Amino acid sequence: MRCIFCQLERDGSEEHVFPLAIGGPLTTDRVCEPCNSQLGSRVDAALVDHFLIRMRRAELHLAGNSSHVPSEYEIMEGVATLVDDPELRVRTKFNPRTQKMDIRLIQHKSPVIENEKGEVSFQVLVDETELHTLPLIIQRERKRRRLPPATEQEMSEILDRASRTVTVRQNPNVLFNLTVKFKYLEHSLLKIIYELAFLWLGETYLDDPRASELRSAVTSADPAIAQTLMGYCGDAGSSDLFPLWLPHRAHHLAFATVINERIAICLRIFDIFAATAWITADANRYLNGTDGRDVLRFLTIDASTRKMLSSPFLDEVMRVVRKKGESQTVGAVPDPLCL
């Protein structure tokens, strides 16, 4: 078997064209295991682990290969700072029992202050749930300063003062630093386009000069190279690539069309990302004087049910025209899986 990425003769493995983690049922066995593994961890992960996609996966309960469904609240989990006291850090975690965020203070020690007598003092702040750790903290600090361990009476007095100085913050405001990674996102969308091109255009497509450019870009470690081969890649709401179909929160769409003797594939992932790239400069090589019913395809996938519908693009355009006439609408219409 000739792998569609490395072009080597190797055993094939199951490859999901649209990653399984976003509900993709369409597969091919023309990707070898090494390419499947490498592209899965670097390229596919850039899409399925993007925080916008993870939020949608949580909403639709899409687990993927790991059998783990992302949490709707994971974007709010982790380490943050208090808005009214930025020096204090907290750890947040969603509590499924209370349906609220648990916010716990991370241990904080103020700078050491030494007076003219050589006495030192500092303040240790801990979460109320961690008060039991104070004796250990105190004894550790005393040992560090070569002081004898606190006596039982001294420790009792310290803990008594601590219990009387508990501060309760009602509904504290926390500040998160959210890091959004776009590295290899273009690669992941271009990879889907390339694999669709192979499935729709057939075996001879692997020898097309444009196919060589696309797979080289997808497999490249250069984060910027894939973007140079795409006509558009970004927010689906800002794109005019899908004027005929209404956006759907659970559906993926793709179609192939001819533009100036080139064949291009347009792709929409949920209603979040859209992308397009031309896949060959010689449309006639694949159309062979026909209307391209076997080559110019339309595909829609319901990620929740994994139901998939594939049809000639021309047939789908005619369906949209009829639908517009029946409903007397001017704008976009629902895709066929909405019926």
Image (tube, rainbow, N blue to C red):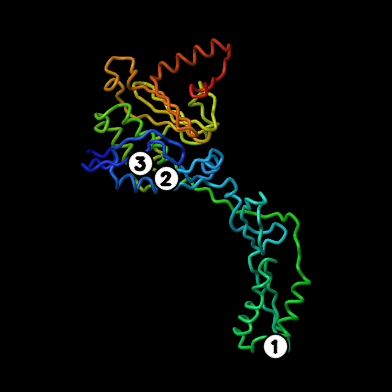
Percent of width and height locating residue 207: 24, 32
Instruction: Tell me the element at label 1.
Output: loop
Q: Of 108 and 27, which appears nearest the observer?
A: 27
Cα separation, mark 3 vs mark 1, equals: 65 Å
Q: Residues within 10 Å of mark 3 (few under 14, many from 20)?
A: many
Residue at label 2? 65
Please indicate whether residue 315 sits to the left or right of residue 288 in the image.
right
Q: Of 66 and 45, which appears nearest the observer?
A: 66
Q: Of 247 and 276, which appears nearest the observer?
A: 247
Q: Mark 1 and mark 3 in contact (Cβ < 8 Å)?
A: no
User: What number is the disc on residue 218?
Assistant: 3
Residue at label 1? 118
Percent of width and height locating residue 264: 38, 27
For marks 3 and 1, the one nearer the N-term is 1
Name above or below for residue 128 compared with residue 49. below
Name above or below for residue 152 compared with residue 274. below
Q: Looking at numbered disc 3 in the image, what kind of residue is underneath it?
A: Val
